[in-house]
Every structure is written in C-alpha cells, then in structure tokens.
Amino acid sequence: MNKEDFRNFISSKGLKITKKRDEIFDEVLNTKGHFDPEELYMRLKQKGSKVSRASIYRTIPLLVEIGLIEEVERVDKHAHYERVSADSHHDHMICMKCGKVIEFFSPTLEMLQDEICQRENFHKIRHSLEIFGLCKQCQ
Amino acid sequence: MNKEDFRNFISSKGLKITKKRDEIFDEVLNTKGHFDPEELYMRLKQKGSKVSRASIYRTIPLLVEIGLIEEVERVDKHAHYERVSADSHHDHMICMKCGKVIEFFSPTLEMLQDEICQRENFHKIRHSLEIFGLCKQCQ
DNA sequence: ATCAAATTTAAAATTAAACTCAATAAAAAT
DNA sequence: ATTTTTATTGAGTTTAATTTTAAATTTGAT
Ligand SMILES: [Mn+2]
Ligand SMILES: [Mn+2]
Ligand SMILES: [Zn+2]
Ligand SMILES: [Zn+2]
C-alpha cells in the first residue's frame, strides 16, 4: 500500500485527489501503533497542516475502506484505529489494570474462525478478538 | 445470580440498597438478548417505574462489575449489553449489511485462547470475539 | 426518630461524530 | 489557457450518547 494505491482508489471511486487527503494518508502511513481521530488531527496540526477535524472524520472511513487501517478496541467512548498490513493482522490482550495492550497472532485461531463461518454460511470480512484480563506484572 | 447476590454486592461496596437499583436489576434479570440503555429505560418506564436515564447509566457499570451483563458489539455509536450466565458464553457474527447478529460457541476456540494466554502469562478474565461480514441472505 | 451521607431527578454540560453551506480547489470541457 | 462543472473544505452548528450538577429525597446507622 503506497500513495499511488491510495490515489487510484480515490479516483476509481469518482472522488478527487486533494492535498488534504494526501496529507492525512501520509500521516497515517507514518503512524505506528494505535491512534484516535483527535491524535491524528493534533499530529497534523503540529506539522503545520491546516486540516480540519471534519476532513479527518471524512477521510478515516476511506482509509478503512481501502484497508489501510481498521478500528480496534474502544476503551473510551471514542473509536481507535490501527494500521493494517497484509501480514500484520493480530488480536489484542488488554490489561484491565494498567491498560497495556499485548498483540498476538495465532494461525490456528484464524483458521478455526474461518471454519466456523463456513459452517454458518457467513461471509467473514474482518474480526476483532479482544481478551481482557491482567498482564504478568499486574496479577 | 439473584437479588440477594446483588444486594450483598451493593452493600459490600459501601453503597446503598435503593428502590431504583432494585428495579433496574430486576428488569435486566428479566431481559433476554441484547439491549441498550435507552431500551432499558423505556421498558422500565412502560412498567410504571420513574427511574431516570441518569440512574440507568449509573447502574449499568455496577451490573457489569458484578458480572450480570457485559458490553457486546457496538454497531452504532452507543453501547449494547447482554446478560451473562456462567453457561451461556458465546461470541458474535455481525452482518455489516442488515445488522443481524448470529451467536455461536466453539469449545475449541475457547481452549485455544486459554492456551495462548498461558503462553503470554496473561490472566484472562473475559474476551470478546466479533466477526464482521455478510450473512447468508445479504451476500 | 434523628441525621449524615449517598442517591435521586431534571436539567445542563460534555463529548464524539456528523452535518450545513458558502468559499475554494480539482477535474472536465471548451 | 480559460471556463464550467462538481467535489471538497473548514467553521460552525447539530445530534446523540453519556456524564455531571445541584437541589430534593431516601437510606442506614445510631
Ligand atoms: Mn494492535
Ligand atoms: Mn449475544
Ligand atoms: Zn497490566
Ligand atoms: Zn445480513
């Protein structure tokens, strides 16, 4: 996934390639870890960008649609996102005491879910598995 | 889980046993399936209860803490809850088109999660697995 | 029964997110 | 290159969910 992919995606939807969309895309591409719309807005602002929150909120669904990011855990009442790479899908363990997030990936677990969905004739697009509990340090 | 358990829990926290808390507890105990705070409020109102939304919102965290309910999928931007029983844990497939929720349970999947947590020295308390996609009818 | 402390309600405040619309920018047509 | 069309933008407004406030009521201990 690079800027060309994004621009092609935008064009193919009949939308326009704009400075603001590019700025937001670039910033998200350079973001590691979890973030929320406000953080993204602030980071862009600090870099001198003049994007508005409205543009952030309007662009995020596009980034989700193209598969650059996905919504992750909602610990507060607002949404959090994280970059997706083809090879980086993972699930989360979340410590209920210190808030630490442990990322993990289990191919067996993924396959098992595929099987279960087949059985139910459900066409799986994405999933979110969050295990809540206590991390080693907090037990 | 019965009213006595709830009352003991409330007392043990140094809180007071009140009519409103009892009414909310009773209503949730009689609720099957998923619900949101507004639905709970309306159902109580129709039964003649004079509870306010504020009390609903203040009591829900207590019901979560005692383990009577848990938060389930957030398809809209508001929270949804569901009653928990020791023997009724299940996960959800959620249709992204029609909103249908399919409940499923896989012992293998549960065991696999336990194993993964052991490996990470994570003390698992609960988990939430939501698979998003398209149901048979919507594909 | 008394009374301090917790709880209640309605209303106001807060928050995340979506929407409105006049001004602007991008793409298409000339 | 200029004009025309159409989409996008940001500031501010709006909505909906949830939380807080503050005055009135209820609870539980004495
Ligand atoms: Mn992650
Ligand atoms: Mn369910
Ligand atoms: Zn921890
Ligand atoms: Zn469906």
Image: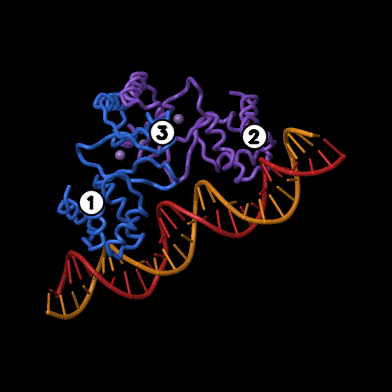
Chain colours: A blue, B purple, C red, D orange
Q: Amino acid at mark 2?
A: Gly
Whether ligand 1 has any atom under 8 Å from the Cβ at mark 1 is answered as: no
Q: Is residue B102 visible?
A: no
Whether ligand 2 has any atom under 8 Å from the Cβ at mark 3 is answered as: yes
Residue drawn at x 59%, y 29% is B29
Which of the 4 quarters of the picture holds residue B127?
top left
Residue drawn at x 26%, y 30% is A105
Front disc: 2 or 1: 2
The chain ID associated with circle 3 is B
Q: Where residue B40 sits in the image (x, y, percent)?
A: 57, 39
In space, the residues marked 3 and 1 are separated at their CA atoms by 36 Å
Crowding around mark 2 (Cα neighbors within 10 Å: few <14, some 14 to 19, many 20+) is few
Residue drawn at x 69%, y 36% is B18
Q: Amino acid at mark 3?
A: Val
Task: Say if labels 2 and 1 share a chain.
Answer: no
Which of the 4 quarters of the picture holds residue A17?
bottom left
Crowding around mark 1 (Cα neighbors within 10 Å: few <14, some 14 to 19, many 20+) is few
Q: Which residue is mark 2?
A: B14
Q: Amino acid at mark 1?
A: Asn
The chain ID associated with circle 2 is B
Task: Say if labels 3 and 1 share a chain.
Answer: no
Q: Which residue is mark 3?
A: B101
Q: Which residue is mark 1?
A: A30
Q: Which image quarter is the C terminus of chain B in?
A: top left
Crowding around mark 3 (Cα neighbors within 10 Å: few <14, some 14 to 19, many 20+) is some
Q: Which image quarter is the N terminus of chain B in?
A: top right
